[in-house]
């Protein structure tokens, strides 16, 4: 591990160890991410495996590559092994119409009409919990293995470009990370575990093109060869008793997940607790009391903290705000506002005087001290940390983390912060966001995209 990241510990509570020798590229916004994914699929020689949580009607890859199924069908025609794990909510009722590929009879008829021959399995969690991972794995088990880890949904509004100019289909800010090297093999291991134990794999409507009991995948035995110099750890949320496999992790020891896994949460707490200078988080939720408490403690130490959220809060957050019985849960969030070096912010593009188009922040990322970062599907919410199935990739490498910070702030502030250290960059973010909040209140154009939000009023 690079010496400038040693103060931020990795976690021992998950299935996968910290692995050196990786190549890492952060992909800011959906157009860039999906372009990289389609290029990897185009270059694939052996396989394309995908985990899907949400798929919205009308989604298409950039540059005319077509729908998810167009991409997958073309890969099958080239002789590749193509597999998809779709999340399925409780089959009694589709609570996500139009954004959820449940494998209904009508949807299966659509696949049949297309002549789709990729393999698929559907996976259910009890109650309203979600298999929320959104990963792509190309050429698993080969020297060219590459993985994409993040939280970008297959949604037309997610195919956005930096700058987020206003547009009719909506505008979502998000981030993915592209990995090659030993950490990609851990993504491979996770996919095999999920594929082999997908809840509905033996149901007639739980697999495509049909049920095949002999179509399980072998676990990878050894990690991929080194492809770079970045230390990476794959962390997850896995609900207890979701999977029973105790097959060794690549090059490691058996790890039982019967009791579940919450290593994403553990890593968030460890990283925030180790922060010395700056914390920068982007998430669609700020709804974990323990993470808010950890941020409060960091602020007490003098750490600069910026937390970017959707200006229009998540609907469930808004509903919770309306419940007077839940009011005490929001008091720790309000208390963060007492620190002058804390900034809760949103982003919006200008479309004329007093005409602001809020950009929905769907990213799930954190950066600490310009030395450590995590990118994944996990929201800062107890449900994501304990219930939904999630995956993050964390990396300890100052040049990579610093480059990501510079890219994000260039988009949000319209300012190049390459000449600033991380703490000064956060101060600039806070100062500009505060000026923009005042200008926004008077209908004036914003300088960049970021504006400050009052924690006491957020979501009300």
Image (cartoon, helix red, strand yellow):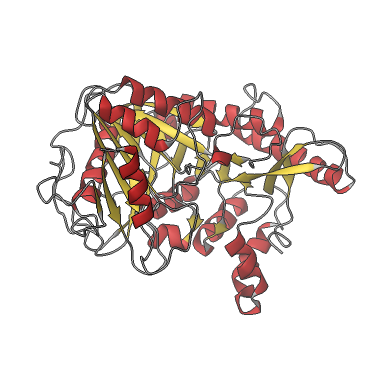
Residue 256, percent from left and from top: 18, 56
**Left or right: 417 with respect to 212?**
right
Q: Is residue 131 visible?
A: no
Residue 412, percent from left and from top: 67, 34
Residue 460, percent from left and from top: 72, 64
| Quarter of the image with the N terminus in it | top left
Q: Nearer the viewer, residue 67 or 165?
A: 67
Q: Nearer the viewer, residue 314 or 401?
A: 314
Q: Which residue is outermost to the left?
A: 214
Asked which quadrant contains residue 29, the reply is top right
Q: Nearer the viewer, residue 309 or 406?
A: 309
Query: Residue at point 32% right, 32% down?
Result: 73
Query: Residue at point 34% right, 49% down?
Result: 109
Q: Is residue 7 visible?
A: yes
Q: Which residue is outermost to the front?
A: 113
**Left or right: 214 with respect to 392?**
left
**Left or right: 266 with respect to 334?**
left
Q: Which residue is outermost to the right?
A: 442
Q: Nearer the viewer, residue 18 or 110?
A: 110
Asked which quadrant contains residue 140, the reply is top left
Asked which quadrant contains residue 124, the reply is bottom left
Query: Residue at point 82% right, 42% down?
Result: 355
Q: Which residue is outermost to the bottom?
A: 325
Residue 391, percent from left and from top: 37, 47
56 up-or-down from 457: above or below: above
């Amino acid at each position: 591990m690079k010496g400038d990241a040693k103060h931020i510990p990795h976690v021992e509570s998950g299935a996968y160890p910290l692995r050196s020798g990786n190549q890492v590229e952060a992909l800011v916004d959906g157009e860039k991410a999906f372009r990289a994914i389609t290029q990897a699929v185009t270059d694939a020689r052996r396989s394309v495996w995908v985990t899907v949580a949400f798929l919205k009607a009308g989604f298409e890859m950039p540059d005319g590559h077509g729908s998810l199924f167009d991409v997958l069908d073309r890969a099958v025609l080239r002789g590749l092994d193509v597999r998809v794990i779709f999340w399925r909510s409780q089959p009694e009722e589709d609570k996500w119409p139009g954004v959820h590929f449940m494998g209904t009879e009508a949807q299966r008829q659509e696949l049949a009409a297309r002549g789709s021959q990729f393999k698929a399995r559907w996976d259910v969690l009890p109650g309203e919990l979600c298999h929320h991972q959104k990963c792509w794995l190309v050429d698993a088990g080969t020297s060219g293995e590459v993985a994409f880890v993040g939280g970008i949904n297959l949604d037309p509004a997610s195919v956005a470009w930096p700058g987020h100019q206003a547009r009719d289909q909506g505008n979502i800010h998000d981030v993915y990370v592209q990995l090659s090297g030993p950490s990609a093999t851990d993504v491979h291991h996770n996919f095999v575990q999920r594929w082999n134990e997908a809840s509905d794999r033996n149901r007639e409507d739980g697999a495509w093109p049909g049920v095949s009991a002999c179509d399980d995948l072998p676990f990878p035995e050894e990690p991929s060869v080194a492809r770079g110099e970045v230390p990476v750890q794959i962390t997850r949320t896995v609900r207890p008793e979701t999977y029973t496999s105790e097959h060794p992790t690549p090059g490691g020891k058996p790890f039982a997940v019967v009791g579940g896994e919450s290593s994403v949460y553990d890593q968030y707490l460890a990283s925030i607790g180790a922060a010395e200078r700056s914390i920068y988080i982007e998430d669609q939720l700020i709804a974990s009391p323990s993470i808010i408490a950890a941020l409060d403690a960091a602020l007490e130490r003098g750490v600069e903290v910026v937390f970017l959220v959707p200006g229009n809060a998540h609907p469930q957050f808004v509903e919770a705000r309306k419940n007077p019985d839940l009011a005490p849960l929001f008091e720790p969030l309000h208390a963060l506002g007492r620190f002058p070096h804390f900034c809760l912010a949103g982003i919006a593009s200008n479309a004329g005087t007093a005409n602001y188009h809020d950009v929905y922040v769907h990213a799930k990322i954190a950066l600490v001290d310009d030395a450590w970062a995590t990118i994944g599907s996990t929201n800062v919410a107890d449900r994501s940390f304990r219930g939904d199935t999630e995956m993050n990739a964390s990396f300890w490498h100052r040049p990579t983390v610093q480059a990501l910070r510079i890219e994000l702030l260039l988009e949000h502030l319209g300012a190049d912060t390459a000449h600033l250290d991380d703490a000064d960059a956060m101060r600039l973010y806070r100062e500009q966001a505060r000026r923009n909040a005042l200008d926004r209140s008077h209908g004036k154009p914003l300088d960049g995209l970021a504006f400050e939000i009052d924690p006491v009023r957020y979501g009300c």
